[in-house]
Image (cartoon, rainbow, N blue to C red):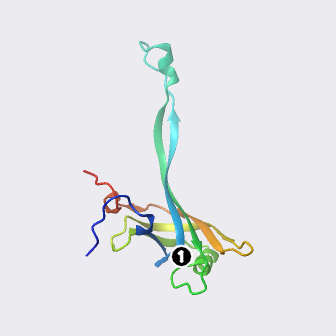
């Protein structure tokens, strides 16, 4: 049974899976919901003021989702670390992405994504890290009621 949570949402409660495996030793992930828009300018009705023609309307022409993530490289990785992601990237094929709350089997976001970028950083005498960006490949399934936090009532 899921734990009843109160207070602020802990980022460690939100998981990101790529190709069925959680991002290994993930330190952060950020999901960005993008809207592509188009300006619409029309001549106002004859009775409108001169300034009425300065205001533009907006139309939505596209929606997209991008997800960026960062993690630490670990010798004993059991989830989806840099090597797993690099292997998926080199195929040039989309991957299945799932975002869900810890202790839940019901994701709030699923869909096909491409690995748009993957980077490894290896500074001297410091932890090796990796990061990447995923971009949706077609329509995603998104259910805001299944993400932790505020209610939608």
The quadrant of the picture occupied by the N terminus is bottom left
- The number of numbered badges drawn on the structure is 1
Query: Residue at the spot x=44%, y=64% of the render?
Result: 11
Residue for badge 1: 25
Residue 23: x and y in percent read 51, 74
At label 1, counting other C-alpha atoms closer than 10 Å, the crowd grade (few under 14, some 14-19, many 20 or more) is: some
Query: Residue at the spot x=44%, y=13% of the render?
Result: 46
* Farthest residue, direction right: 124
User: Is 133 on the left or on the right of 149, as rendered?
Assistant: right
Q: Is residue 151 above or below residue 46?
A: below
Query: Looking at the image, which is closer to me, 28 or 87?
Result: 28
Residue 115: x and y in percent read 58, 68
Query: Looking at the image, which is closer to me, 15 or 140?
Result: 15
Q: Is residue 60 above or below residue 7?
A: above
Query: Residue at the spot x=30%, y=61% of the render?
Result: 6
SS for tag 1?
Answer: loop
Residue 59: x and y in percent read 46, 39
Query: Residue at the spot x=38%, y=60% of the render?
Result: 9
Residue 34: x and y in percent read 50, 51
Q: Give the image quarter of residue 71.
A: bottom right
Q: Give the image quarter of residue 117.
A: bottom right
Query: Looking at the image, which is closer to me, 78 or 27?
Result: 27
User: Is 29 on the left or on the right of 100, as rendered?
Assistant: right
């Amino acid at each position: 049974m899921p734990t009843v949570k109160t207070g602020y949402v802990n980022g460690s409660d939100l998981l990101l899976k790529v190709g069925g495996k959680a991002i290994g030793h993930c330190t952060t992930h950020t999901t960005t919901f993008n809207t592509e828009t188009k300006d619409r300018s029309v001549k106002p009705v004859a009775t409108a003021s001169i300034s009425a023609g300065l205001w533009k309307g907006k139309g939505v022409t596209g929606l997209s989702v991008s997800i960026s993530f960062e993690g630490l490289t670990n010798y004993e990785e059991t989830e989806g670390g840099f090597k797993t992601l690099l292997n998926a990237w080199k195929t040039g094929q989309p991957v299945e992405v799932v975002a869900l709350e810890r202790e839940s089997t019901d994701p709030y976001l699923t869909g096909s994504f491409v690995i748009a970028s993957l980077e490894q950083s290896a500074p001297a005498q410091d932890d090796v890290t990796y990061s990447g960006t995923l971009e949706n490949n077609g329509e995603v399934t998104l259910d805001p009621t299944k993400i932790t936090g505020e209610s939608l009532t």
